[in-house]
Amino acid sequence: MKFFKSIKWRLQLWYGLILVAVLAGFGFTAYQLERGRLFGRIDDELHRRIGVIAGALHHPPPHGPDRNEPPFDRPLPGQFPDDGPPEENLHPPREFHLPPEDAHFFDASDPNNFYYSIQDLNGKKNWHSDNDPNYDPKSEVAMLSNDSLRLTYREIKNVLPSDVEISVGCSIAPELKELRLTALKLGGFGCVILSLGLAGGWWFVSRALRPVENISATAVKISAGDLSQRINVGEAESEFGQLAAVLNSTFARLDAAFAQQQQFTADAAHELRTPVSVILTQTQTALNREREAADYKQTVEACQRAAQRMRKLIESLLALARFDAGQEVLKRLPFDFSKTVSDCVELVQPLAAERGVKIISEMSPLQVTGDSERLAQVVSNLLTNSIQYNQPGGEVRVKFESQNGLVVLTVADSGPGIAAEDLPRVFERFYRADQSRTGTGSAGLGLSICQAIVEAHGGTIEATSEVGTGTTFIVRLPLV
Amino acid sequence: MRILIVEDEPDLLASLAQALREEGYAVDIAANGDDGLFNAEGTDYDAIVLDVMLPGLDGWEVLKRLRKTKKTPVLMLTARDQTRDRVKGLDTGADDYVVKPFDLEEIFARLRAIIRRSANKTTNLLEIGEVKIDTAARNVFFKDKPVELTAREYVLVEFMALHRGEVVTRTQLYEHLFDENENSLSNLLDVHVSNVRKKLGAEFIATRRGHGYCIE
């Protein structure tokens, strides 16, 4: 049932139902008002004619043509019962004649015109007009109470004090026909409004939901692998515009993360190419002809160096991957940080001597909780870095102190320094300030690994540098 | 044939130089961009093998500066294999491009090709009278019979054949046949020339007194 799950269709359905309810209510009211108006008019006419009949009963017309009373001079039908009939007219009249000037009220030539009947209380009909349907056995008229609605006739009865009952009625067929026409008109009008409303609603809903379609189309393209796609943000201030902006920034971050990952893979492959080239050329050269044992030894040594370099690179990559995945389990044990630092200084001393770099360290015992092996890796990485990017006769200063619950380790070199625009990139993977790798054998991952280890300990690492003066790395670690 | 290799990875540089020397080339080496450019500008090499990632001047910069003065064929070595790097290399003036890791055979073949192209030759087969030289297989035939030549002798024959019709001076021959460490042995060239004449006929290489040698 995709149909009912679609928001568009559901909105349209609710909208349509509400519109139908409103139109039905409106149509019913209009119909009732029209019906009341038509029947009210008929009832007025009937009351007036009852007055005429009653007047004719109590004031029989004189037998002379000179009597010319205007018909509306007589008491109005509504007032008649209140005024009370004159005393001398309390007996039922013996005969009844409709005054000639009132004859037009009951034109019997058409059965649809008004009719009257006058009967006494015994039910005996004394007089009636020729078109009285009560005397037609086939008539549908059912006698009902006063002011009642009959099927196609409407009739009013009035009992005079002289025990004479007057009934006046007429056919309401034309009115019923008019009412049916009105109902048809209202129905037609309602249908037109409903279809216009539904069409307008469909247009509006489609328009309102178009950004959703836009977003979903873009998301489909992105899930198909094209990460450069962005949602076209049409109306930035609408809710959809804001959503699209949020999604776009998410897509941009995904794109950047993906590009970074690709760059990382490309760089890793690139770093492996040179040692593999060494092994290939060394072995192919050696195998080209018979060699002395010393030549083979040289070849094997070169291959070993290349393999060591690849091993170091692979270990670094794996360490970074473990930190990235949060899989690296750090030991959390208290240890003496000064011991770690002095061990590291001792370890890099031969390299420092080779480069003519002096290491100056200031330290006093300090208990730190963390992974001593990993933190030793950070210290020796920073030291090696400072020695390698130093100048002959330069120096490396190492010190650490406890500040506000943090241990602050500073490693400063007196090397050429790093340009301000390169400084933020030094922790990037495979980034080397000097694009060559002469002598260092490093792939540009050392500082990335330091950063990963320090951050896994809940600490921070930063670098400050001044070109010509040197570079300083500052590591801040929580003591506990 | 004298070749310059500019490469900063010592093990790679050493094995490449050894392999090319064993192929009969005279090989000079440089471990950084500045030395590489200095050598390349000072000597007429038959080809240069140039790494892209170098300390000091990088490969692109060396190539750009070299192209201002010399048309020496250059084979670039790089660890980047993206198309834009290849395009950049070729547009900067490199004659060919090899991506690390490579096979030595490929380096040999590409070097032969760029040297041949720079001498305006399109095939591997050179025919001079009754002498046929197959530069790909490094074989020489005299009267349709294979002739045994030492590597140095072969290179002498090939160099003279590639410069057929020109007078090649002794200095040129020294420059192209011997690397910078061998220059002191001045009579070595005469020994090679006389050996070649013995194997391919005395008239194959003519001597122009006071100028040098020539293959007609």
Image (spheres, coloured by chain):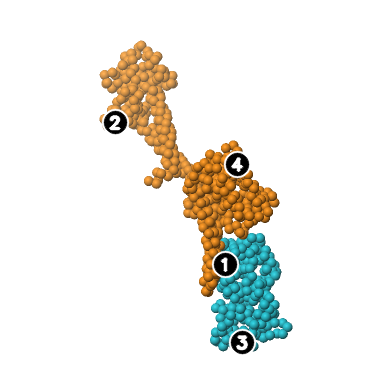
Alpha-carbon span between mark 1 and mark 3: 39 Å
User: Where's residue A135, x and y in %?
Assistant: 28, 28
Of all chains, the one bearing label 3 is B
Asked whether the beta carbons under mark 3 and mark 4 sit within 8 Å of each other, the answer is: no
Which color has been applied to chain A in this rendered view?
Answer: orange
Q: Point out the frontmost of discs 3 and 4.
A: 4
Helix, strand, or loop for circle 3? helix
- Who is closer to the viewer here, A88 or A156? A156
Disc assigned to residue A364: 4
Of all chains, the one bearing label 2 is A
* Quadrant hosting residue A295: bottom right
Asked whether the beta carbons under mark 1 and mark 2 sit within 8 Å of each other, the answer is: no
A312 sits to left or right of A106? right
Chain shown cyan: that is B
- Who is closer to the viewer here, A452 or A62? A452
Q: Residue under label 2, please give it.
A: A139
- Who is closer to the viewer here, A319 or A213? A319
User: Where's residue A301, x and y in %?
Assistant: 54, 64
Alpha-carbon span between mark 3 and mark 2: 150 Å
Of all chains, the one bearing label 1 is B
Residue type at the position of mark 1: Val
Q: Point out the frontmost of discs 4 and 1.
A: 4
Looking at the image, which residue sits at the far right?
B210
Disc assigned to residue B198: 3
- Residue B62's place in the image compared with A216, above or below, is below
Establish whether labels 4 and 2 are both on one chain: yes
Q: Residue under label 1, please give it.
A: B98
Q: Which residue is drawn at 36% across and 31% down?
A: A172
